[in-house]
Image (cartoon, helix red, strand yellow):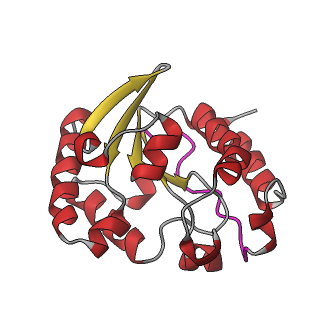
């Protein structure tokens, strides 16, 4: 099965998922979107209200900031694959519970296997801790990490930069490091 068809199959499974209670409160599951052969994959925490309404990842204010950061290094949203640890919105945008992550993480692992990105960009502490283990974000941001044949890059979540403007400059610097690594 080709990568595009494999991703479509995974996304259909996510749309119909009932593995955790979040399926009862969501309007739309949010599998993720982007090219099935993307060099860069961005992984956030979980869908928010706008994402739940549309079924698309990073479409609210955090998404606009992510697009601005991508544009700042010469990329468009359509160049990358964007998804989250959770595929359904937690009530009131609370932090995901361990059982919810455990129910959802296999979908993300399968997406990674199909897309086989060169670099997986982990946006924020939830993505970092669930993909590579506990790190202090203030020390982890702007760093690359190799594990199990994958290259990860860690930075703040765009929502943090919206709440605390000092993180926006830090994220811009981190994205420059990412651009340098991509060599384009």
The answer to whether residue 80 shows anywhere in this view is no
Quarter assignment of residue 78: bottom left
Which residue is nearer to you in this view: 38 or 91? 91
Q: In the picture shown, does residue 42 fall above or below 139?
A: below
Q: Residue at x 59, y 57 (%)?
A: 32
Q: Position of residue 9 (x, y in %)?
A: 78, 47
Residue drawn 63% across the image and 36% down it: 109
Residue 91 at x, y = what percent? 64, 74
The front one of 124 and 55 is: 124
Q: Which residue is found at the position 26% from the left and 45% from the top?
A: 141
Q: Position of residue 86 (x, y in %)?
A: 62, 56
- Looking at the rendering, in which quadrant would you find the N terminus? top right
Range of residues picked out in magenta: 26-39
Q: Is residue 131 left or right of residue 87?
A: left
Most distant residue in the top direction = 149
Query: How many numbered circles are shown?
Result: 0
Q: Main SS type for the magenta part? A: loop
Give the position of the C terminus as an image quadrant: top left
Find out whether residue 58 is within the magenta segment: no
The answer to whether any part of residue 107 appears in the image is yes
Q: In the drawing, does residue 145 fall left or right of residue 92? A: left
Residue 40 percent coordinates (x, y): 41, 42
What residue is drawn where x is 16% and y is 66%? 166
Q: Quadrant of residue 62?
A: bottom left
Q: Is residue 115 left or right of residue 87?
A: left
């Amino acid at each position: 099965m080709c990568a595009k068809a494999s991703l479509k199959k995974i996304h259909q499974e996510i749309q119909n998922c009932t593995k955790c209670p979040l399926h009862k409160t969501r309007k739309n599951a949010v599998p993720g979107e982007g090219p099935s052969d993307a060099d860069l994959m961005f992984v956030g925490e979980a869908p928010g209200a706008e994402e739940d309404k549309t079924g698309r990842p990073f479409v609210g204010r955090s998404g606009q900031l992510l697009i601005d950061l991508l544009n700042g290094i010469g990329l468009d949203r359509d160049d990358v694959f964007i998804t989250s640890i959770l595929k359904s919105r937690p009530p009131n945008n609370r932090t995901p519970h361990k059982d919810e992550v455990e129910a959802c993480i296999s979908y993300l692992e399968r997406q990674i296997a199909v897309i086989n990105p060169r670099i997986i960009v982990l946006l924020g502490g939830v993505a970092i801790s669930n993909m590579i283990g506990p790190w202090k974000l203030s020390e982890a941001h702007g760093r690359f990490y190799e594990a199990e044949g994958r290259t990860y890059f860690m930075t703040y979540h765009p929502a943090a930069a919206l709440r605390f403007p000092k993180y926006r400059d830090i994220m811009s610097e981190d994205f420059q490091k990412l651009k340098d690594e991509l060599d384009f």
